[in-house]
Amino acid sequence: MRLLAYFSLFIFYFSLKMITFAATMAQIAVTYDSIMKELKEHQFKPVYYLMGDEPYYIDKISDWIAENVLQPEERDFNQTILFGSDVNASQIVDAAKRYPMMAERQVVIVKEAQNIKNTEPLEKYFKQPMPSTILVMCHKNGKIDGRKVGYTKAIREAGVLFESKKLYERELPGFIERYLKAREASIDPKSTQMIADAIGADLSRLTGELDKVLLSLPKDDKRVTPQVVEDQIGVSKDYNAFELRDAIVNRNVLKANQIIKYFDENPKAGGLYALLPLLFNYFQNLMVAHYCPQKNNQEALAKWLDMKNTWGTRDYLTGMQNYSGMKVLQIISKMREIDAKSKGLDNPNTPAGELMKELLFFILH
């Protein structure tokens, strides 16, 4: 009997763990793509709380809901746009509790939700939301205070809690490739890096520039090349961070110095803050490449570096010939020093351009 009791207790404990795990996985699985998939399948939730430092995804989701959930003739009476700086939580709840007029549902979109102070009425509403209302809360430039555990829990139980995070610089090339591929266009690695370096992580601006590039392409040739990038975005195909990286990899001192000089004379074309992450990522991977058991085998090296194909391994094969493991270690250390100096540590006066030249000289000599 005691054994049976222990076994029953174990089954209960295991089931509880599995439920907790499933709930955690459900939270982890909330992405922009998963939300858009459900929306397009008309699987609507009563609450969408969209928060984070990247406004692009927040705007994309809320705009889709505003433009597609209701028919045009239904929107006059059943779609409400509110601003968190103009209304309080009780007014939002009053709007959300209204019944739709001559429609299956109503949509209430609250912009600037980060400005709402007292969220208690909203928390109560989230515990019993109106099934005929889709309430969209757009909370930009931050997220819910971590101390509001009950508020966050109520949102998750009512619908969708989504955090829109800023992309890291290293994630931009992948975003650019996916964005263009979805629009049946292709792009080479050099052009990808040129755009990423020139525009940066502002996704609204980045997608705007990509759309401009797409419009310039002929219908029978949807390839984005360095020349197209130069013509449409204004980034030099010969003097950019990608070309500088290539010159450094090949230890081409003349070309590297020409590009640095160009950057010095044209600050908008490139600079230390765009250059450091790009070079640090390369030399960090080059250090890893030096430890590959079959470093001269392209397929083995690609697998060792977790690369999708062998094309990119050529830079690392060349780099290992031009930079010993000890030199790479010294370069990484120097980059950390330059990064600290660029932020004012032990450096009261040296401008970024001079720091960039200092780093280049150290790498190439």
Image (cartoon, rainbow, N blue to C red):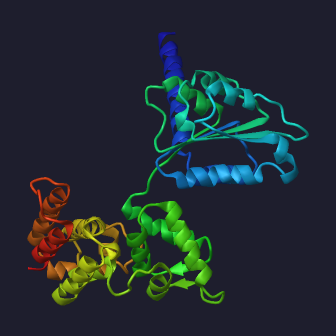
Q: Residue at x 55, y 79 (%)?
A: 213
Q: Position of residue 17 (x, y in %)?
A: 49, 29
Q: Quadrant of the C terminus?
A: bottom left
Q: Residue at x 81, y 41 (%)?
A: 78
Q: Position of residue 273 (x, y in %)?
A: 28, 64
Relative to 128, is 355 on the left or the right? left
Camera-nearest residue between 103 and 150: 103
Q: Is residue 185 visible?
A: no
Camera-nearest residue between 365 and 25: 365
Q: Is residue 365 visible?
A: yes
Compared to residue 86, the image places residue 350 above or below, namely: below
Q: Position of residue 48 (x, y in %)?
A: 63, 40
Q: Quadrant of residue 334?
A: bottom left
Compared to residue 117, the image places residue 337 above or below, namely: below
Camera-nearest residue between 326 and 109: 109
Relative to 330, is 298 on the left or the right? right
Q: Residue at x 47, y 82 (%)?
A: 229
Relative to 101, is 361 on the left or the right? left
Q: Residue furthest front?
A: 86
